[in-house]
Image: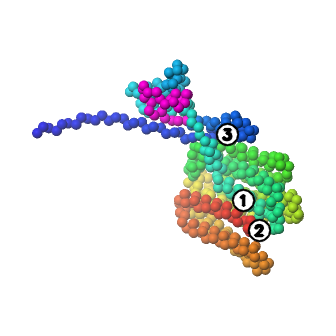
Amino acid sequence: ASPPRARPARTRLPPPAEPLRRRPRDPWGAMGRAAWALVGLLGLDLHGLVRGLSVRPVRLARAPLGYQRGLAPRRCDASGVDGLAERERSGQQPEPEMAELHTVLEAAEDGSSAAAGTVAAAAAGTVAAAAPQEKSLASALRVAWDFTRPHTIVGSALSIPALFLYAVPSGLGAAALSPVFLVGLVAALVPSLFINLYVTGLNQVTDVDIDKVNKPFLPIPAGRLTMRDAERLVGAGLVLGLGLPPLLSVATGMALHSGALYGVLTGSVILGTVYSAEPFRLKRFPLLAAVCILSVRGALINTCFFGHARYLLANTGVPGAAAASVGNAWGMLSPSCVAVTAFYAVFGVVIALMKDVPDILGDEKNQIRSFSVRKGAKFMLALSSNLVVALFGVVAAGVGAQGVQALAAQGDVLCGLRKLGVAGLALGSAVDLYRQRQRVEANEPKQCYKYYMRLWKYFYASYLALPFVG
């Protein structure tokens, strides 16, 4: 028997270089062009509009596939790698970056010193400047939307119209449909959303290190928004928020801004600034941080927008509207306004206590001595949960008693049934929040954050039910 033939040693080839993926898009590199688009649209300048929408191209980080010696690459762009052969045939001089890339590719095909990884690296450095590809403006708008912290934007967008409707006295529904009241609502809502952008944006700009631990999905720590562009958005929100009310009043010829409106706008700016920015940075002190949130969400928003709505009602010209809006500082000291302010003040405390529970890891790392860091996540979760359940329980009892009284004494069936319905919703909210709390583990930040966002949903829902209480 012949001896077994020895197997020739296999030469292991180096693994093929993994093609580099596309670099993440940076939509905010085209902020100036977006501004040009807006200018072109407002001025009906089609050339300016097209130039504005010509967003800076996506930069590719890989060499073109299928590039081989002797084969003319497919034609994509006269300035890109795929147009290099066409330039050589026509006798044109290629751009220096593209000539360098062509040399590296030729060396790689000859088996010389350039390896596949080197080719990919060279392509990343040269094709980045010469491989145009359009990208949509929708991605930029998506980043802007995420930067605004949508749950706060939605809360403001719901609360202001609800407070305006709540401020309309019974029997004056026609005043709520007057042009002054409706235009005044829009003129108050839009600047408030810009101020909301300023406050939440400033908090993200000053909390980048903390958000890298607690909220890495936000635009700045995720790398979707540069710090410079974030600061521009914050500055634009401040300027537009404070500058729009008088401009809208002049443009429409209506008295759309009042002391109450400027009180809530400037107050939110001041408290939002001292909450986040140095040298104040009151968020480092749990009690002062809670006072800031309580003052804005509880007192300023509810009393000032209620008073501004009464101010607009007095200027509608509807019979009886002016008389109903005079006194008690446009109704800001009336029992109905005080009751709403008290409810949202307590709800603001709940949000202030609960917001730090999911952020306990980042706060500890950055030496932010919040209540959750001092007392523990379990204690603060239980405290905020019990407080909000008790709050909805009190509302269910109080509004339910008013509904029964309306049915029994006054004989107003519609008002009584409406208030009983609101009381039933409040009781169901208390039960649901209590049951959801039992499923949350205090040492699981994701579960705590989910419960925190659930509180915001009930915050919205309470504003939707507010016009049915008055």
Question: In terms of sequence position, does the residue under pointer 1 or pointer 3 come before the other?
Answer: 3
Count of numbered marks: 3
Q: Residue at x 53, y 39 (%)?
A: 23
Vertical comparison of 51 with 356: above or below: above
Q: Which residue type does callout 2 highlight?
A: Gly
On screen, residue 117 versus residue 263, left or right, reads left
User: How far across and down, in percent of the image, does residue 80 sit?
Assistant: 53, 29
Tag shown at residue 429: none
Per the image, label 1 sits on a secondary structure element best described as: helix
Q: Residue at x 14, y 38 (%)?
A: 3
Q: Quadrant of the N terminus?
A: top left
- Determine crowd level at label 1: few under 14, some 14-19, many 20+ residues with C-alpha closer than 10 A: many
Vertical comparison of 366 with 332: above or below: above
Read off the residue under disc 1.
159
Q: Main secondary structure of the magenta part?
A: loop
Read off the residue under disc 2.
470
Q: Please say if the residues under marks 2 and 3 sit with CB atoms less than 8 Å apart.
A: no
Q: Which residue type does callout 3 highlight?
A: Ala
Read off the residue under disc 3.
34
Per the image, label 3 sits on a secondary structure element best described as: helix
